[in-house]
Structure formats: C-alpha cells, structure tokens
Image: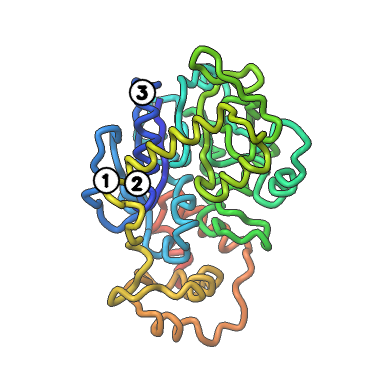
Amino acid sequence: MIIFTSICANYLHKARCLAESVKTHMPDAQFFVCLTEREMPNCANFDAFDQVILSKDMWEGNFDQFIYKHAIVEASTAVKGQFFRYLQKSYPNENKFIYLDPDCYVYSDFVELRELLNTKPIVLCPHLLQPGNIDMELSSTAHGVYNLGFLAVNNSDEAKRFINWWAERLYLFCYDDIQRGIFTDQKWIDLAPCFFDTYIFKHRGYDFAPWSLYECGMTCENGKYFIQGDSLRFIHFSGFGASAEKCMRDWLPEDEVPFHTLYREYAQQHEKNNADDVSHTAWTYGVCKNNEKIDDSLRLRYRSNYDVMFSIDNPFAMSNSEMRRRLIGIAKPHTFGAKVNKAVSLLVHGQWQEFAERFKKQF
C-alpha cells in the first residue's frame, strides 16, 4: 500500500505529522511526498518519509509552463492527478494507492479500505453523511460533494481511466475559482460517479473533519475512538487553527468531549514538527526573474490565454513587466474547443513532442 501527500515546503510540518501517524498504525505502508518546489530543501529530510519527489521530476512535459499559472493554494492540488499516474506506472505490482491531505492524522489501520480496494477501483468520501448542517450542505454544493483530502484507487484499468480523465481536467482547470464552478481539484469529482465505477465510502471513521462535528456522536472507549459505532481511522484537521476552532465552538457542546482531546494532541504534534519554523518557508515558484514576486493578476491572464501560455517555454524567466507586455492586446481568452482538448490530452499523457509538432505553431 502506498500513501502519499502533496505539498509545498511550507506544509512540511503537517506532512511530518501525517507520516508519523501512518508509520505508527500502518508500518507496512510506504509514505511518499510530492513536493512542488524548484529544488529539494534540506528540511525535506525526515525519517518517516520513504521518498520525497519533486513535482517537476515526475512531470511529463514542460512543468514551468504548467505551474506558472497556479497560486500556491492551487499548486499542490494541480499535480495530484499526474502523481497518481506516476505511482501507478512506477509501481505496477502495487494495487492500493491512497492520497491524504497533509493536515490529516491517522488513528488506526485502514482495515475496511484495504479490503475495498481489492475490488473497488475508486473510493471517495463525501463531506457529509447526514443532513441537518445547512451551512455545510451549502458549502458542499459550492466546493464539491466529495472531499479530496482523501482519494483511493487501485491499479485497475478503470482506475487508470479515471486518473487520466482527472489529470487532463487539472492540467488547465485546477483553480480556486468557485464563480466558474471550479474549486481546485475537488469540484471535478462530483462527475466521477457519473463516468466511472466509483464507490462512495460512508464509513464515519474515515475523513472525519471539523465539518463532521455537528451531532457527530464521537465516543472514547478504552482509549479507542468511535463515531456512531464506526472506529476512527483518520481525522482531517482542515482549517487547523481559527477555522477549525470556530467549527468546534459552533457544533460541539461546551462541555469537554473526545474531539477536544484529539485536537489538543494534534496541536502539540503540529507544533513539535514545526520547531524549525518550516511553515514560513517561501514558495520557490512564487517568484520570477530577478527574484521578483509574480503578480497574481498576470497568473490569471496567463492561465486563460493559450496563445501566450503555449508559446513561452519558461515564463519564470520573464519579469512581470515582460510578461505583461506579452499579454497586452489580447481581446479575449480562447474558448475551450476540440483543438485545445486534444492538446491537453497529449500533454497529460506525456506526448510532448507530438503536441509540439501538431499544436504549438497554432497557439
């Protein structure tokens, strides 16, 4: 079984917490980190990481051209589809691939999931498993029904078809842009059960999160935690800090309950693994020529302008002013038609030379 997470360096402390918890409860699992940085930092060395792989090193095609259009909040999600493909190809004898967000923490072995992946190609967890929390019901309609802090697939042909489809969509459409119906990698997965053999996993002990707190019924018995009878497998501490603590105030009773204990314990681990202050690491893809911070407005214009995007091999080699001059005079972005659809398919499947020959001169 392979478990991986995807981060930029400022989330290494969270990945350390996750890796430690995985190794404690599933020592047979390999733990990989997909790191979206230019070079491997010294702080990426950690005993619980089996391997740290730079996104650019597993990428097929022009990574600089791809990553320039993403802000840091989008970057680590935009590469997840390609990293699944990389793992499936690199480990053909492995049949269980699990993604967990770095702010997850494992509390027991994934007994049920191991069994499911023997026969189910794709396993998803919904945000919500019961009605009543209207705020979160509305949030799910905007951000996605399924939480992509967790995703599990096996190595079947059906799983590969799903991953290829998802990776293609993420190549040009993995943005925090809810007004356009996109929320990073997550909103796309609303369509997955329509297109693929997808199992909706309704075990309450997986992907338990602050949005799960409303009338959750968590209990502790002899040091083991349960949610309405389901054994706790992992907690997704999404929004750790102010956001998660607001959920606790809003949806938990004032009296001490088991989640308060788990939250405090995770906070201690979180602080311990950030002793080197890695959370303040600057993102190396956040700057361009002469170490100039990239203007986010240029990222937005670049991402919708395929003429510019596919004509510049290394956009990071350009200053903000140089990129701005290249973007001047474009009246409107391209519509996403058959030509671009074919180009993205070639790029995602690593057929860079064919893309260059057939499409580059047309953009």
Q: Identify which residue is drawn at 45% across, 69% down.
A: 310
Q: Earlier in the sequence, mark 2 or mark 3?
A: 2
Q: Which residue is mark 3?
A: 24
Residue 152's place in the image compared with 335, above or below, is: above
In which quadrant of the rendered view does residue 4 lie? Answer: top left
Neighbours of disc 2 within 10 Å: few (<14), some (14-19), many (20+) = many
- The disc placed on residue 126 is none
In which quadrant of the rendered view does residue 75 lie? Answer: bottom left
Q: Secondary structure at mark 1?
A: helix
Residue 203's place in the image compared with 168, above or below, is: above
Is residue 108 at all visible to an observer of this figure? yes
Percent x, y of residue 292: 34, 76
Q: Identify which residue is drawn at 30% across, 50% down.
A: 57
Q: Which residue is mark 2?
A: 12
In which quadrant of the rendered view does residue 182 lie? Answer: bottom right
- Which amino acid type is marked by label 3? Thr
